[in-house]
């Protein structure tokens, strides 16, 4: 355990940020699963609406630096492909 005051503060700060990042990442994953659930059920309208919200969440997580930009782009592309194949 750290003895220096600044090191103790860093540990607390890092723990707080880790918890926030974890919750944002979890929200994003839940949103992705929601879109995939609508795709499985062939529910085009709800899938498109959920995709729009999910893309916003993914973009926000990328902007905060929680996941890498390429990872976010890949997730969005895969979801969009699944939703677009429903309409075809």
Image (cartoon, rainbow, N blue to C red):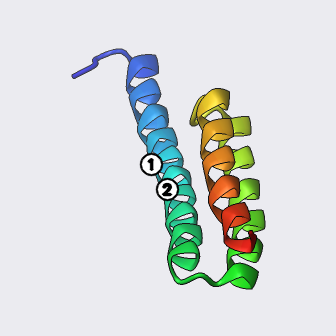
Which residue corresponds to the image point at 67% horizontal and 71% vertical from the top-left?
86
Query: Position of 5 compared to 72: left or right?
Result: left
Which residue corresponds to the image point at 50% horizontal and 76% vertical from the top-left?
40
Q: Who is closer to the viewer here, 8 or 62? A: 62
Q: Residues within 10 Å of mark 1 (few under 14, many from 20)?
A: few
Query: Position of 65 compared to 13: left or right?
Result: right
Most extreme residue toward the top is 4
Q: Is residue 57 visible?
A: no
Residue 25's x, y, as percent? 52, 50
Q: Who is closer to the viewer here, 47 or 57? A: 47
Q: Identify residue for label 2.
A: 23
Most extreme residue toward the left is 1
User: In terms of secondary structure, where does tag 2 sit?
Assistant: helix
Q: Is residue 44 above or below residue 29?
A: below
Residue 20's x, y, as percent? 52, 49
Q: Is residue 4 above or below residue 69?
A: above
User: In terms of secondary structure, where does tag 1 sit?
Assistant: helix
Mark closer to the observer (1, 2):
2
Residue 48's x, y, as percent? 75, 72
Determine which quarter of the picture holds residue 38.
bottom right
Residue 41's x, y, as percent? 53, 83
How far apart are the two marked residues, 1 and 2, measured between alpha carbons? 6 Å
Which residue corresponds to the image point at 76% horizontal and 75% vertical from the top-left?
49
Q: Who is closer to the viewer here, 33 or 83? A: 83
Q: For the C terminus, give its image quadrant.
A: bottom right
Which residue corresponds to the image point at 62% horizontal and 60% vertical from the top-left?
82
In the rendering, which numbered label is found on residue 19?
1
Q: Are marks 1 and 2 in contact (CB under 8 Å)?
A: yes
Q: Is residue 71 visible?
A: yes
Q: Who is closer to the viewer here, 41 or 87? A: 87
């Amino acid at each position: 355990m750290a003895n220096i005051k600044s090191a103790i503060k860093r540990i607390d700060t890092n723990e707080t940020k880790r918890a926030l990042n974890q919750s944002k990442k979890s929200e994003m994953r839940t949103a992705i699963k929601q879109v995939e659930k609508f795709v499985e059920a062939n529910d085009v309208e709800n899938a498109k609406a959920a995709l729009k919200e999910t893309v916003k969440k993914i973009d926000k997580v990328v902007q905060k630096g929680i996941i890498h930009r390429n990872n976010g782009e890949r997730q969005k592309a895969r979801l969009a492909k699944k939703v677009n194949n429903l309409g075809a």
